[in-house]
Amino acid sequence: MRVLDYLELSSRLDRAGIGTAHDQQVAALERARAAGADVEVVTSPWPDGDALGGLYAGLRGRGVLADVDVVHLNLIGPASVALARYARRTDTPLVLHCHVTSEDFRESFRGSDAVAPALRRYLRWFYSQADLVVTPSEYTRRQLLDYPVDAPVRALSNGVDHDSVAGHESLRKPYRDRFDLDGVVMFAVGSVFERKGLTDFCAVAERTDHEFAWFGTVDSGPQASPTVRRLTGDPPDNVTFTGWVDDKPGAFGAGDVFFFPTKEENQGIVVLEAMACGRPCVLRDIPVFREYFEDGHDCLLCSSREEFVAALERLADDPDLRRRLGENGRETAAEHSLERVGEELVATYEELVG
């Protein structure tokens, strides 16, 4: 069984959660193949991965696109639309992976709130073409059913690539020295958006004496929101915005408490990465986190700035609590292994092909 697992604009999304999710899918399928599953994954729609070669093949009377048994698409742009139509025309099973909703598009870029209602209508049309829509959570599945999307929708965890954060402890000192961090450091990882809780992150930091660091890309172009420009341009004295860092494990090594006051997520791979590193997590109490995590067991869930401050202070003062939440978090992350993701993806493809 040959599967096209395609991410449009992959070179521009290598720093985004969608890029991470796609890379994890490919890694999961490769592990499944190594374990004996009858699956081969290709990431380019062109034969041999070469667009020019595909055109030459077409001129010689061969197929322009790669010969596959399943088409699995991860974005919603024009190339994905064309491949979805190709799959429908050739009666090839089509899986559309929902990494984008109108809800999580809000408060991301300048003007994103105004675009979100139209995006919802587009997504309803786009996802309805699928033989199966895969979502990272039951929460997102319910959202799509409310659009409503006219296709079967199934939840499947993005999983977490433990290898991608391996060696984080060895990078602790270099990264703390590099960004002048000391004490119990509260940290976040990922692109800096207001949807990710930027305003609350800074407001909570101002109410404590601890250091806060956000490791991730800060948009400076015309797409950056005024809020991002203002808070990253003149942050509180105890907040550091590092910008993009080459070694992701270094971010998880430098920080002590993962603080993620995001307002909307489809799952939150970065939370699983923090848990895989044994870092205690303080999260906003939103439905998708209730689905995967347990308050007081592997994280602390909070609903207000006052609760965030209290939770962070509690963890700063209680190393035993940090250790207990971190150990339980490791167990939670282990339940989302790429081996399990690979098994579920292969079973899904076999069901569609069968």
Image (cartoon, grey):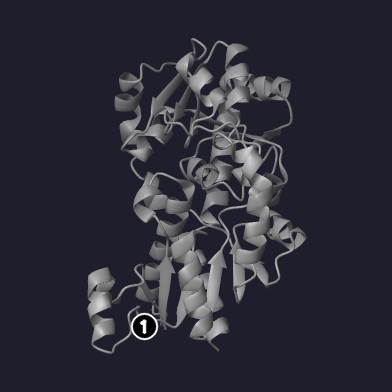
Q: Amino acid at mark 1?
A: Asp
Residue situated in front as seen by the camera: 135 or 157: 135
- Seen in the picture, residue 217 relative to 130 is either above or below; the reply is above
Residue 164 shows in this picture: yes
- Seen in the picture, residue 125 relative to 289 is either above or below; the reply is below
Residue 4 in picture, x, y percent from top left: 41, 73
Q: Quadrant of residue 313?
A: top right
Tell me which residue sits at (43%, 52%) in the image.
19
Tell me which residue sits at (55%, 24%) in the image.
226
Quadrant that contains the N terminus = bottom left
What residue is pinned by disc 1?
A: 67
Residue 163 in picture, x, y percent from top left: 37, 51
Q: Quadrant of residue 240?
A: top left
- Seen in the picture, residue 134 relative to 225 is either above or below; the reply is below
Q: Quadrant of residue 289?
A: top right
As helix, strand or loop, the secondary structure at mark 1 comes to: loop
213 horizontally vs 156: left or right: left
Residue situated in front as seen by the camera: 152 or 54: 54
Quadrant that contains the C terminus = bottom right
Residue 293 shows in this picture: no
Q: Specify the farthest residue to the front.
A: 59
Residue 278 in picture, x, y percent from top left: 49, 39
Tell me which residue sits at (39%, 29%) in the image.
243
Residue situated in front as seen by the camera: 93 or 83: 83
